[in-house]
Image: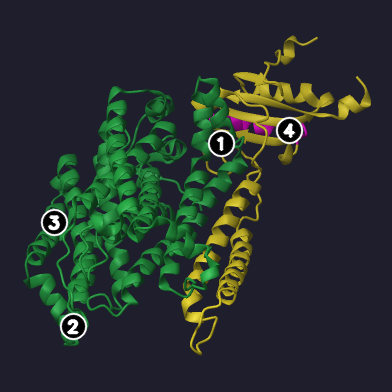
Chain colours: A yellow, B green
Amino acid sequence: MSARDSDRKRELLGLYNEPDDAADAVSRLRGVGFGGNDIEIISATPYPEGAFGEQHAKHRLFAFPFAGAACGLAVAIAWHIGAQIALPIVTGGKPIVAVPAIIQVLYEGTMLGAVLFTVLGVLFESRLPDGIGVYDDRIADGLIGVSVMARERRIPDAQIALEEAGAVDVLSKDGSLMRPAAASP
Amino acid sequence: MQEPVTVDRETANRELLDFVFAWPKWFFATTGLLGAVITLGLIIFLLLMIFGLQLFGYAHPVYWGFPVVNFVFWIGVSHAGIMVSAILRLAQAEWRRPVTRAAEVLTIFSLMTAMTFPIIHSGRPWRTLYWEFPYDWMRGIWPNPRSPLVWDPAAIFTYLTSTVMFVYIALLPDLALARDRVKNPIGKAVYGVLSLGFRGTTRQWRIQAIAGILLSALILPIFVSVHSIVSWDFAVTIIPGWHNTVFAPYFVIGAVHSGVSAVVTVMIVMRYAFGLKNFITKDHIDSLARLLIIVATVWLFFFMLDFMFGLYGTEPAEVDTWQRRLMEPPWTAIAIIFIITGYIIPVGLWLFRRVRRNFFLMFVTTVLVNIGMWLERYMIVIPGLERKSNLTFQYGDYLPSAAEFGIIAAQLALVIAGFLVFSKLLPIMPAADIKEGQILRDEIKVGRARVPATMREA
């Protein structure tokens, strides 16, 4: 194996029946030197944060609505004032841009901007859209997946840690079953 | 909750996705019937474009009829979804879990239906496009962008977009679940694309939880603004009976009353039609009924305020309008039916626990509420316009035509069909949310009693 190959990261997925086993797998992986960013828990159901001893997910989702609101307000002002100036309506001496009449539209524009940016923020912070990575349909039925990104040379360590925690199966990137580490030559 | 949902994950997956993957016979019969009614509505719409508004029962000075009444009614129904879903999410009410999706979907389809009414009301739908994009600039005639009628599309577009986004974000885990469970390769590909590669990592679940709360907090002010703006379509005019400062909160709370009742109706139908007896329990209906007692009573308070403000100024035109609404046929009968069906019968019955936990009675009473609330909107819109003013030389009573009833039936069919088709393609209950509720659910012993204890995210 070349040095380049041994530096390449590969994803392994251990599947567990019980949350305790999955938490044990996370501890074991940490024990053999895998960092928090390398380990991911995958489940069909949201578990309380920290249930598996994983790192707290940092995010900036709360900034998105504010940015969106500012953009929405700016677009609403430009749109509405632009429309009032563009249409040559006879106003009989009244102002062309009537503030009381556009407050509602500015409000809606601001809120729409906030919602749209929040949705974009949700997708961005969830790292979506994304390729599915290593996954198994049995997760939908209740199995819990512990995924680990390991360099080629560290794959055996990761596999042993996942198996020792009681994994039902350990899958590699292409979805194929890994041979049990003990049986590997 | 005294009667929590207790099914294992496998059963939950199967039962919640059962209707998506199965093809019951009644589905074809029902969609066929609904399709026929919608076709009838389309034919009426085509005739409307050919013959114009003479198809409707308008008579000078009444040119706002069924289309406007229905517009207000369906906007009102649409408020339930977000109100129920957003408030319960923000309050982290455990019993919200099976309720939210159906409520949100009802919002989307009733809002889409409501949006068709201004187009029908205009009589010349192509003119609606002109209001937004004035294309015949050669004549020098321009729509007025300062008109209150511009507020409506702005608010409704914002509300619909936000609701669709809200539902889509909440749907991601269920789309992923459908992707994992469906056998058909085309279905797998479609659900795969729609789920955007969601696989349920800790980070994705964390963002899902925050997104639900954040989007709820953003949508609630929009929800209040939408029906306020609908009420201002009336309140900023000088028509007697409409020009009232209390209209915005009165309309909003009326919308909530009507909408939450519609959610209860829909949930009871879903329980039996989609086989969701394990998920929609008496407790859910009971909780919503208790909420409805409060909402209905607040709504009655605002109705009384509207009445009091109308009379207290002793403005002759206002007093005449109320005289017409309450004392002249056929309005007296309509007023009596509306107050009996909208408040007295339902709230009177909901005071009894036995009624609140009886699916049949709850179905009947919530349908009655919406009959009453439709009549309320009818009573708000028409009598104010029917009044003779100094320059009214031609006068006739508004009598809704068969075409208008046909349009109403078609629009109701459109909402039901939309809901049904959605339920056929996507889970109508948030499976992940329900399963989360089961994980977090535990029991603790307090003295000799065992009570449910729920851990909540901070």
Quarter of image, res A164: top right
Q: What residue did someone put label 1 on?
A: B194
Give the label on residue B317, or none. Answer: 2
| Residue lying furthest front | B138
Q: What residue did someone put label 3 on?
A: B341
Name the spot of residue B341 as percent of width and height, x first: 13, 56
Name the spot of residue A171 as percent of width and height, x first: 67, 20
User: Are marks 1 and 2 in one subunit?
Assistant: yes
Figure quadrant of the N terminus of chain A: top right
Which kind of residue does numbered mark 2 sit on? Ala
Q: Is A33 covered by the magenta stretch?
A: yes
Secondary structure of the residue carrying numbered label 2: helix
Which kind of residue does numbered mark 3 sit on? Thr
Name the chain under label 2. B
What residue is rendered at 62% in x and 46% in y? A123
Give the label on residue A31, or none. Answer: 4
Secondary structure of the residue carrying numbered label 3: helix
Q: Which residues are magenta?
A: A18-34
The answer to which of B143 and B10 lies nearer the viewer is B143
User: Are marks 4 and 3 in one subunit?
Assistant: no
Secondary structure of the residue carrying numbered label 1: helix
B418 shown above or below B84: above
Mark 1 and mark 3: span between their CA atoms? 43 Å
Quarter of image, res B426: top left
| Residue lying furthest right | A2
